[in-house]
Image (cartoon, rainbow, N blue to C red):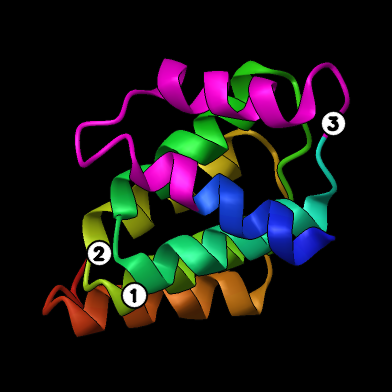
Amino acid sequence: TRRMILDQLCRDLESLGRDAKIGHVGTILDHHFGSSAPDPRVVSGLLSKLGQSKRPIHFANLLASLQHHNLERNVYHASSAITSCRKCCNWGTALHILVDMASARVELNTITYNAAVSACEKGGQWEQ
């Protein structure tokens, strides 16, 4: 089931520790999905679960790994990741993700921008 996949992916990513690199995240994605693209809902759910564990480095690495493997990154992924950054008070990663997704021509929406503003506000960087 999707829940079991999410739980295992989250455990595998958390086992990488705080210094996880994009290549390590890619290896885990390859292990779980092989050559098939992961269901975008699984990726969004994973970003949300990672937010609960307060490991913001994994948000950016997961999205970068998706890009590196030519897998879809969409507005839901951006919003999930940025919202998770807000929960972790990690405004810098939230802005990095926002800029990266916009540069990749992912069409962002009001929810995404509001999440980024909220992350900056919560981190005391409302002027950013």
Q: Is residue 75 visible?
A: no
Q: Is residue 39 visible?
A: yes
The Cα atoms of the two marked residues, 1 and 3, are separated by: 27 Å
Splitting the image into 4 quarters, where does residue 92 fall?
bottom left
Judge the density around disc 2: few (<14), some (14-19), many (≥20) Cα neighbours within 10 Å: many
In percent of the image, x 15 and y 73: which residue is there?
Answer: 125
In percent of the image, x 69 and y 39: which residue is there?
Answer: 105
Chain part drawn in magenta = 11-37
The extreme left residue here reads: 124
- Is residue 125 found left or right of 13 in the rendered image? left
Residue nearest the observer in this picture, 85 or 116: 85
The amino acid at mark 2 is: Trp
Is label 2 in contact with label 1 (beta carbons under 8 Å)? Answer: yes
Query: Looking at the image, is mark 3 or mark 2 nearer the viewer?
Result: 3
| Relative image position of residue 5 (x, y in whole percent) | 71, 52
| Relative image position of residue 44 (x, y in whole percent) | 67, 60
Q: Earlier in the sequence, mark 3 or mark 2?
A: 3
Q: Quadrant of the N terminus?
A: bottom right
| Relative image position of residue 76 (x, y in whole percent) | 71, 63
The Cα atoms of the two marked residues, 2 and 1, are separated by: 7 Å
Please, is residue 110 above or below residue 85 in the view? below
Answer whether residue 66 is magenta in the image: no
- Is residue 62 found left or right of 31 in the rendered image? left
The amino acid at mark 3 is: Ala
Q: Quadrant of the C terminus?
A: bottom left
Is label 1 in contact with label 3 (beta carbons under 8 Å)? Answer: no
- Is residue 54 found left or right of 109 in the rendered image? left
Query: Looking at the image, is mark 1 or mark 3 nearer the viewer?
Result: 3
Tell me the tag on residue 122. none
Q: Which residue is mark 2?
A: 91
| Relative image position of residue 118 (x, y in whole percent) | 35, 82
Q: Which residue is mark 1?
A: 86
